Image (cartoon, rainbow, N blue to C red):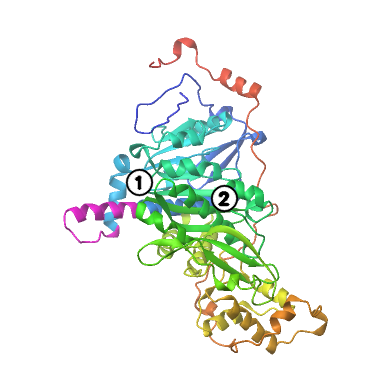
């Protein structure tokens, strides 16, 4: 079997002279791992990376890409009908038929940049409708050997599932021409995906889907601001909303890469899961919409004493032109927090537009419910999609936390439903975060949130032992009288919630990141090549 490098799908194959046959399963030493409709041969000694924690990641990706395939088909049908002056909206059956009938000629062209064992791509081909081809890439020779072995073990054709050993950025840069673009690019590296973003936004088709994972959460959560700035162009700050802030930093980095090429992103769903973040965005080429990008980025001013924060947009639109924003008076003033009197620290810029498309998230969730046997993590996937769909989106970037608010005041912590009812009674929207059950995500300004907490303290006074001194932040906040009396009674928002597994516990100990794959030592790789090299007389002729 030939080890082929395919820099450009749709062009003549560039076949290199590396001749290697895939080891038979009978000669393999390791374990067989089943996931979805795929089975892989996983070698001993951590030669190739695999982490079962990421099953949810792959299930979510399959669900999102399936929905993308149908949205793309619907858009194609509508364009065709518009040319024919036909206003009829395609039915679900028509879209389904289009996806199925055009898979071989105009189906999804997918690029998995860092494929490791090839498990993800094998599942994609078997479980996603309308796939034309998948370029399964990895730079590690051990990974490519594993990919080829697993394709053969699953009895799949390399005409559609194409193994490739190359640098991921080189492959993407060689696909910058529109005719060579990928419809879906999946970046799931060990660590940060930042170095791949420039190539990805150039190699993705107009309206294509970019799937990005970043596992360097300590950096994204503010451990090393200098490192975070060098990777993502963002200065982080440790705060209670760090999980959502990490998502918004990654989205800002993708958008910053895209606008250089007159492209912009539209997030479909953005999730913080376990020890990583995973975002799905569509990338469009539109110089007009690129101008609006500055209005979707903001700096964050975080009070160093309490949970108050302010967002400062980089730009505004006055109805005719885009221009730099005036600094918000709440931030400028004396340069101190109007609630506790402490100074602000500035971080960002971050993506401050919505993280999700609620309508599409609900469609994805409905499809998961219709095909529960398709997803190994169906219960957790359904819970994740449900909690994402419930999040407040408009004018509610970032969030507070009940422990954070209560700790600042040294008061008894109210129940989540009590605070939610108070905010709803005050005329604001509120929800939890899909990652943090204690999160209070609302479009209410800081002073309203603190007035609710002041009203709570009036009903539940703080014990004297909990108050430190007159310079305590909590004392300064409580010194102000609330502008209104919060009403904590009313219908609980949770009463109308759909039953779902929103915040499951880890299924086992050590549920987290695994060590990096060690690959094959030069001597091991030489033995593999020699053991499976074809005799000179049997080698196929390679065209010059």
Q: Position of residue 25 (x, y in %)?
A: 54, 30
* The furthest residue to the top: 537
- How many numbered markers are drawn? 2
Quote the CA–CA distance across marks 2 and 1: 36 Å
Say whether residue 376 is visible.
no
Reading the image, the residue beneath label 1 is 130
Which residue occupies 33% across, 43% down? Answer: 107
Q: Residues within 10 Å of mark 2 (few under 14, many from 20)?
A: some
Q: Quadrant of residue 364?
A: bottom left
Residue at figure coordinates x 65%, y 81% from the top left: 453
Q: Quadrant of the C terminus?
A: top left
The residue nearer to you, when weighing 444 against 161, is: 444
Q: Specify whether 95 is left or right of 400.
A: left
Vertical placement of residue 138 versus 387, above or below: above
Q: Which mark is residue 233?
A: 2
Query: In the visual, does 394 lie left or right of 101?
Result: right
Instruction: Give above or below for 46 relative to 416.
Output: above
Q: Is residue 107 above or below residue 446?
A: above
Q: First in sequence, mark 2 or 1: give its number.
A: 1
Query: What element does badge 1 sit on?
Result: loop
Residue 311, compared with residue 202, is above or below; it is below
Q: Nearer the viewer, residue 485 or 417?
A: 485
Q: Is residue 523 shown left or right of residue 424?
A: right
* Magenta-drawn segment: 71-92
Q: Residues within 10 Å of mark 1 (few under 14, many from 20)?
A: many
């Amino acid at each position: 079997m030939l080890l082929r490098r395919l820099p450009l799908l749709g062009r003549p194959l560039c076949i290199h002279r590396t001749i290697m046959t895939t080891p038979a399963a009978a000669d393999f030493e390791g374990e067989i791992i089943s996931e979805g409709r795929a089975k892989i041969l996983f070698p001993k000694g951590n030669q190739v990376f695999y982490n079962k924690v990421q099953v949810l990641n792959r299930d979510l990706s399959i669900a999102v890409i399936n929905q993308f395939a149908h949205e793309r088909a619907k858009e194609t049908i509508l364009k065709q009908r518009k040319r024919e002056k036909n206003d009829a909206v395609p039915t679900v059956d028509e879209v389904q038929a289009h996806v199925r009938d055009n898979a071989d000629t105009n189906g999804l062209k997918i690029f998995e940049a860092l494929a490791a064992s090839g498990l993800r791509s094998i599942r994609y081909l078997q479980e996603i409708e309308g796939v034309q081809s998948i370029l399964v890439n990895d730079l590690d020779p051990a990974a490519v050997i594993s990919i080829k072995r697993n394709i053969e073990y699953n009895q799949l054709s390399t005409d559609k599932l194409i193994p490739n050993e190359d640098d991921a950025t080189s492959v993407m840069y060689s696909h910058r021409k529109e005719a060579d673009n990928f419809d879906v690019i999946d970046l799931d590296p060990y660590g940060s995906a930042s170095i791949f973003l420039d190539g990805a936004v150039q190699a993705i088709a107009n309206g294509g889907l970019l799937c990005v994972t970043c596992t360097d959460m300590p950096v994204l959560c503010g451990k090393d601001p200098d490192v975070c700035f060098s990777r993502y162009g963002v200065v982080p700050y440790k705060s209670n909303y760090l999980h959502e802030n990490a998502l918004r930093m990654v989205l800002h980095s993708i958008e910053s890469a895209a606008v250089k090429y007159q492209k912009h992103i539209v997030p479909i769903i953005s999730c913080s899961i376990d020890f990583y973040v995973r975002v799905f965005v569509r990338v469009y080429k539109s110089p007009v919409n690129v101008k609006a990008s500055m209005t979707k980025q903001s700096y964050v001013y975080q009070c160093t004493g309490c949970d108050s924060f302010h967002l400062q947009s980089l730009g505004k639109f006055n109805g005719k032109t885009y221009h730099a924003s005036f600094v918000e008076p709440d931030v400028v003033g004396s340069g101190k927090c109007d609630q506790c009197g402490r100074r602000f620290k500035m971080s960002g810029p971050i993506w401050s537009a919505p993280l999700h498309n609620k309508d599409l998230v609900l469609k994805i969730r409905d499809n998961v419910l219709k095909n529960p046997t398709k997803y190994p993590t169906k219960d957790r996937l359904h819970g994740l999609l449900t909690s994402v769909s419930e999040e407040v989106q408009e004018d509610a970037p970032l969030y507070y936390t009940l422990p954070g608010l209560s700790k600042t005041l040294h008061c008894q912590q109210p129940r989540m439903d009590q605070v939610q009812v108070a905010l709803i009674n005050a005329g604001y929207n509120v929800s939890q975060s899909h990652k943090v059950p204690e999160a209070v995500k609302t479009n209410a300004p800081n002073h309203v949130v603190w007035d609710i907490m002041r009203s709570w303290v009036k009903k539940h006074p703080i014990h004297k032992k909990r108050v430190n001194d007159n310079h305590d932040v909590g004392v300064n906040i409580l010194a102000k009288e609330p502008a209104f009396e919060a009403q904590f009674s009313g219908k609980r928002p949770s009463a109308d919630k759909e039953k779902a597994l929103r915040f499951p516990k880890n299924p086992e100990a050590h549920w987290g990141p695994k060590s990096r794959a060690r690959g094959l030592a030069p001597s091991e790789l030489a033995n593999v090549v020699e053991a499976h090299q074809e005799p000179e007389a049997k080698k196929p002729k390679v065209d010059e």
